[in-house]
Amino acid sequence: MSIRHVLVVDDEPDICELLEITLARMGLEATTANHLQAAHDLLAQQSFDLCLTDMRLPDGDGLDLVRHIQAERPDLPVAVITAHGSVDTAVQALKLGAFDFVSKPVDLKQLRELIDAALRLEPSATGAEEHPEAAPLDANDGSPLLGRSEPMQRLRATIHKLARSQAPVFISGESGSGKELVAREIHRLGPRAKRPFVPVNCGAIPGELMESEFFGHRKGAFTGATQDHTGLFQSADGGTLFLDEVADLPLPMQVKLLRAIQERAIKPVGGTREIPVDVRILSATHHDLEKAVREGRFRQDLYYRLNVIELKVPPLRSRRDDIEHLATRILRRISEQWQTGDLELAPGALAALQGHGFPGNVRELENILERAATLCEGPLINADNIDLPASGLSTDPVMYSAPDSPPEPDHSPRNEADRALDDQLAAQERQAIATALQQTGGNRTAAARLLGLSFRQLRYRLKKLGID
């Protein structure tokens, strides 16, 4: 295997010597340049596997070199070395396409981790970013992001590009559009793929436990802390931390999260020292985060750290050509999970789906098809098996923009009574199914017959009611 070659661009002899020694101990060859023009000449003369550049050079700055490499050698990862505390400059470099950054004084452990990650990058798909029609399709690259429409091809091409960086990415999109799938793809296609991917729903963590969940705690830090607890940041060390519904973070936690991102270190609750962590941050929400910033509900400085690059996930109504392909794959999964024969859509059923607005996006499509699979008598799903909300039938995309915030729950006496009745009916249904299964010795086919249901309908009820 040939020795990997790194270009070091810095006008400080001490830094160059430190980097050369570090690279040599890693079995890498280093070539140094002490100004911008020398770096350009070397890049024109030979190939490199990685470029490390200082931000301040006698005849320019590192941002100029990042721009040049992005234009002329986009497959070459470039990392920048910034002055301590110059986070804004580092963020600017990431926006221009830098792989990552390291601050002075250089932490050698962090530097080695950066170099290892950069050298694990695979060559990008030629022309995929500039020509989305050349991007890999889900049929041959293992992507769970299904669809062959132009918006999906463009999305996959952008994901391939973002996977080659360590920049924080903010994933925006409506509920049910697949934001977590996008985050998992960025992780899967990047150099951290073999390290942990840790998703967290920020809105699901109680406020009093949030700091402990994110940063961990030491034994005895508070009542009930009977042992040390590893937080989400440490669990994701070396990998990716996905902050879903990040807009739901309370303001005090936003301050602590900002510090952890900027310092690349966390302090467990009850701890006495900070612990370095190597984590790539991806975040998402269906809320309008800019509006939350304007209203003072989300810190502007944290917004800029998370939203170095924004990736918008298209809603299903903007890629109706994908509905047939998506429906085919979803029905195949349903038939495999429910152990039924193959299912397919009649033309009328497909037309009904393609005319629907899908305010719930792909998640809504999955739910509609699951219900349809229980209602149809044979392998063919007809239009009358497709249960669509009347308000969702439209081809006008502007009618289905996501709300800025979810509707407030209705706690009226009538609503509470309806919910109690639903719970009671579900309990009765669960008991009836359990009794039928007990009487038939667990034979689901016989239990379905006893209940007057088809086998497929029984499987649907078992799943919905959480009966194993």
Image (cartoon, rainbow, N blue to C red):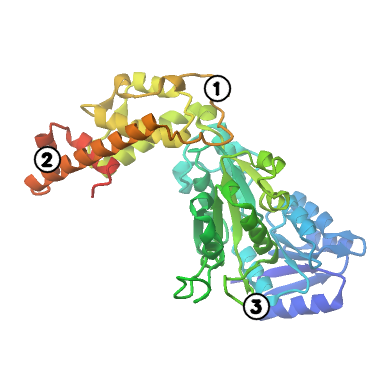
Q: How many marks?
A: 3
Q: Are marks 2 and 3 in contact (CB under 8 Å)?
A: no
Q: Which residue is mark 3?
A: 27
- Marks 3 and 1, the one that precedes in the sequence: 3
Query: Is the N terminus in the top left, top right, bottom left or bottom right quadrant?
Result: bottom right
Residue sitting nearer the eye, 167 or 405: 405
Per the image, label 3 sits on a secondary structure element best described as loop
Amino acid type at mark 1 = Met
255 w.r.t. 237: above or below: above
- Where is residue 251 drawn, in percent x and y? 64, 53
**Label 1 neighbourhood size at 10 Å, few (<14), some (14-19), many (20+)?**
few
Please tell me which of labels 2 and 3 falls first in the chain. Answer: 3
Residue at x 51% of width, y 61% of height: 209
- 247 left or right of 350? right
Residue 447 tag number: 2
Q: CA distance from mark 1 to mark 2?
A: 44 Å
Residue 245: x and y in percent read 55, 47
Can residue 35 be spotted in the picture?
yes
- Pick the residue in front: 128 or 218: 218
Distance Cα–Cα, label 2 vs label 3: 66 Å
Find residue 367 and report its image quarter. Answer: top left
- Residue 456, compared with residue 6, is above or below; it is above
Secondary structure beneath label 2: helix
The mark closer to the camera, 3 or 1, is: 1
Residue 466 lies left or right of residue 279; in this view the side is left
173 lies above or below 212: above
Res. 38 image quadrant: bottom right
- Amino acid at the residue labelled 2: Ala
Residue situated furthest right in the rendering = 59
Callout 2 crowding tier (Cα within 10 Å): few <14, some 14–19, many ≥20:
many
Residue 396 placed where, x, y %?
54, 19
